[in-house]
Each structure stands twice: as structure tokens, then as C-alpha cells.
Amino acid sequence: MKYNLAVLKGDGIGPEIIDAALLVLRRVEETFGHEFSCHFANIGGAAIDSCGEPLPKETLDICLASDSVLLGAVGGPAWDSLPSELRPEKALLTLRKELGLYANLRPALLLPQLADASPLKPSVIGDGLDLLVVRELTGGIYFGDKGTGEDFAYDTEKYYDYEIRRIARTAFEMAKNRKKKVVSVDKANVLASSKLWRKTVSEVHEAYPEIELSHMYVDNAAMQIATHPGQFDVILTSNMFGDILSDLAATITGSIGMLPSASTGEGRRGMYEPIHGSAPDIAGKNIANPMATILSLAMMLRTAFGLSEEAERVELAVRRALDEGYRTADIFSEGKTLLGTREMGEKIASLI
Ligand code: IPM
Ligand code: MN
């Protein structure tokens, strides 16, 4: 089969981690006889520098014409002083909206090989961590009415019930293949939008009697993730809360450099990217961890292309590289073998 892939390297460590992931993709191609045709396009700060805007129309068109999008990362200090409409991050938000990617899936899995990299005590980790943050991605305060006056500025958190309903369905569907538990996180004791969130999620839940649903306030959820992470299976939440809680969930698994994400909508086309950012401080040094991007690639193979065997092989290769003691700097510990970004990509590719 031939698959069309839009590849957006972006800024900072983006190009390095994508190049490493493409080594793995090429290996999958050879091993399984597929053809992945990659269409490269500019995004973020790199696009601002070359075309004067963070998401050139050509880039959006390439994404719309492809079966799926693989993204590195966007942003960096060079573009920090630009107004928000012109910032690299705006490209990401527009792309999510234009592609209709309302569901952001962020699995946080603690691999046993990296247990000692977690900042949590073994007693807190218990039997391990395996949770999935289902973050609403095209609504809420990120996209609500906003403005700035002489001495004020505001953003609006607004949700339509249809937006809540569809993301709730995603969470319940995901829970079916997991531990069948959904915790919906909101701030219903303060926010009107959260009250609607809670009511709507409960209504959608009626069609999923086999799934256990509970509700939690976001402040408590942050505390619970840090102190009793084992209680969570699927965490369903809004755009803003999901942004914050997914970083927290990622951190307790040892390194944010390990975690992939998928953004999907109604169709099969999705966007796949590591959950970490562009890490400008380590860009160009060949030291970033490409595993989150490689695992995002695996999610893409499975979800966008239905290639589950191929996806599993990629995930297995990542685990095997860890088993064999290979580490990038962020997860390095004594006695292990330190690899650079490219070398880790080569290693994982060779283990496919
Ligand atoms: C993320 C990022 C983005 C977000 C930024 C870069 C706009 O933090 O994907 O989590 O806030 O959604
Ligand atoms: Mn974030």
C-alpha cells in the first residue's frame, strides 16, 4: 500500500527527532513492503522566517491532501515577542482546528525499564502507571473570544454541548479497550462551562453502562495524579486542563521525552506528535530523545493506517532498545549506553 504523509519538522529539536523517526519509518517500509510518501512542509518559527507566517497556505494544503500528519515541535525564544496571531504556536492551533482534530490522546505509560527515572517514590508508583489523557483539542479557552484593552485582557472558556459529547464518546470508547474507568476532570464548583461539561459527560455515559465514570475537580486531580496515580485509567478533560494535566502525567513516567500523542477527529486522518515541545536549549546538539516521536509514529501506523502489526514492531523496538541499555541523555543512568538522537533512531530502526 502507498500512504501519503505530511511531515512538519518545525523548530528547535523538531528536525532532529523527525529525522530519527524517519529512519524508523524507512525501516518499516523495507520490512513490510509499504510505501510511505513523505511531503515535507514548513511550520512554526521556521515558516515565519521563510514565508512570513507560521502556517503557510501551502502547508495546510499539503496536510489536507495527505493521509496523516507527523509533526516535530514548534516555537522558540526567537519568536516569543511576536503577537499571538503570528506566533509559531498559532500554526499548531490552526492546524488542529482546520483538520477537525478535536480529540487529543496522550498516553502516559511508565515503562518498567525507566521506573528509576520517575520523580515519584516506588511506593507511590505501586504497580506502575498506565493512564490516558483524553484532551478536548479544538474548543475551550484556546479558541474562545479574546481581547486586550488598555488595562485589561481576557480569554473565554466556552463549550458547546456537541463538543463535550463527542470528546466524551472518544473517552468512553478508549476506556472500553482499557480498564473501563473514566475520570472526567472539570472545575464545576466554579465554572459554568464545567457545569455543562459534567452534565453532558454524565448524559453520554448512559450509553456506556460497562464503563465506570467519576468526576473530579481539576485541583484535586492534579494532587491525585501526583500522589495516587494508579487510580487513573482514562482522564477526560477540557483543552486547557488537559494541556496542564498531560504534562504532569507525562513527567511522572520519567521523561516527557518518551510520550507520544495522537490528535484525531471524525475521519482517519490525524496528527501525530511528541507531547514535549521544541526544547530550544538542546536544539542542534543531537541529544534530544526521539522516542516520543517514534512512538507517535507507531500510533500513526496503528490509528491512521490500520497497520497494527507494524505499530507493535516499532513499540517493541523501542522497548528492546531500552532493555539493551540504550539511553538518550534525558533518561541516562549509570551503567547504561548513552546514544545521540540520530544514533537512537538508527538503533531502534535496526531493531524493527
Ligand atoms: C501542547 C502544547 C501546545 C498547547 C502549545 C504549543 C500551543 O503545549 O501541545 O500541549 O498548548 O496545546
Ligand atoms: Mn502542552
Image: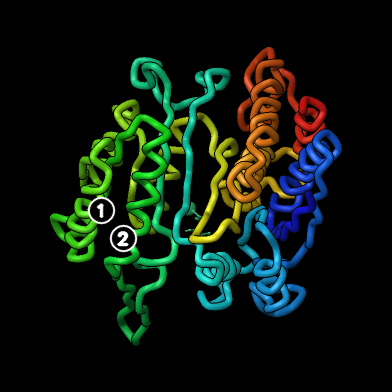
Coloring basis for residues: rainbow
User: Could you say where residue 99 lies in the image, as x and y percent from the top left?
Assistant: 56, 67
User: Could you say where residue 291 lies in the image, as x and y percent from the top left?
Assistant: 66, 36
Disc nearest the viewer among 2 and 1: 1
| Secondary structure category for the residue under label 2 | helix
| Secondary structure category for the residue under label 1 | helix
In the image, is the residue at mark 2 within 8 Å of ligand 1 by its beta carbon?
A: no
Gap in Å between the C-alphas at discs 2 and 1? 9 Å
State if disc 1 and disc 2 touch (CB < 8 Å).
yes
Residue drawn at x 63%, y 53% as measured from the top left: 278
Which residue in the structure is indicated by mark 2? 164
Residue drawn at x 45%, y 55% as measured from the top left: 103
Left-right relation of 87 to 243: right
Q: Residue 81 occupies which quadrant of the picture?
A: bottom right
Left-right relation of 251 to 18: left
- The number of numbered discs placed on residues in the rendered structure image is 2
Residue type, label 2: Ile
Q: Mark 1: give few (<14), some (14-19) or many (20+) Cα within 10 Å.
A: some
Q: Which mark is residue 204?
A: 1
User: Could you say where residue 41 lies in the image, as x and y percent from the top left?
Assistant: 75, 66
Of mark 2 and mark 1, the one earlier in the sequence is: 2
Residue type, label 1: Val
